Amino acid sequence: AQSVTQPDIHITVSEGASLELRCNYSYGATPYLFWYVQSPGQGLQLLLKYFSGDTLVQGIKGFEAEFKRSQSSFNLRKPSVHWSDAAEYFCALGGGGNKLTFGTGTQLKVEL
Amino acid sequence: NAGVTQTPKFQVLKTGQSMTLQCAQDMNHEYMSWYRQDPGMGLRLIHYSVGAGITDQGEVPNGYNVSRSTTEDFPLRLLSAAPSQTSVYFCASRERGGSTDTQYFGPGTRLTVL
């Protein structure tokens, strides 16, 4: 069975500080991995995705993520957080067929 | 393209009532899915479809029915609503396989069952 763990339920950072959101996965084959962001009352927006190749993936809004097979991780990073980045972030694992397995989300708060 | 659209945005039902959540996409995507989002639980797959006339169950299918008569539409039916079905529902679609294996989400329907 495939699963995704986001160990941090809430994270607070100061504006301008760096950010790292953790994501660990369990899957028996090469995973497809995604990070989505959800602003309050909105749907999910895709930030970035990893399918294969370069393990450092660039996304929108200045986000990047690094796939580390040895650690079963796909952590999301941003060098300098903006107040508008406050939202909930979901890591997701794409397995066979149409199945996307989501983590429980990390709520990001940005202090001004 | 409008992408994935969902109606209604908000709905309040009484226990035992039935209703249909509508989902449509104009991207000619073969795959469509319904998820529910509950606090602290992320998104969970309810039902999905890999093409017109083909549907299958996801993680939490009980209490929900779906059908896929056209490529564009994938309605979700609640036959007899229960308070446990209070949630935010998201519809998603994607192309088949390869580097386009990315789901596009609708804006969601917030359902409250009293």
Image (cartoon, coloured by chain):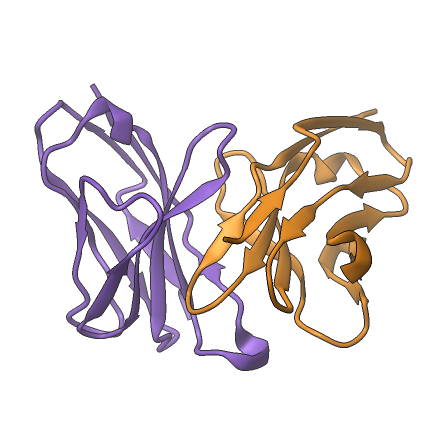
Tell whether B104 sits left or right of B73.
right
- Above/below status of B82 relative to A76: above
Tell whether B22 sits left or right of B80.
right
Q: Residue furthest top?
A: B114
Q: Chain A's colour? A: orange
Q: Residue at x 69, y 47 (%)?
A: A24
Q: Residue at x 30, y 28 (%)?
A: B86
- A12 or A28, which lies in front? A28
Q: Residue at x 15, y 31 (%)?
A: B81
The N terminus of chain B: image quadrant: bottom left
Q: Does the rendering let one see residue B28?
A: yes
- Above/below status of A110 relative to B67: above
Residue A29, image quadrant: bottom right
Q: Does the rendering let one see residue A81?
A: no
Tell whether A12 sits left or right of B41.
right
* Residue A110 image point, x, y percent: 77, 28
The C terminus of chain B: image quadrant: top left
- Above/below status of B80 relative to B58: above
- Above/below status of B39 relative to A98: above
- A10 or B8, which lies in front? A10
* Residue B60 image point, x, y percent: 31, 43
Chain letter matching colour purple? B
* Residue A61 image point, x, y percent: 75, 54
Q: Residue at x 47, y 68 (%)?
A: A96
Q: How many marks?
A: 0
Residue B11, image quadrant: top left
- A18 or A104, which lies in front? A104
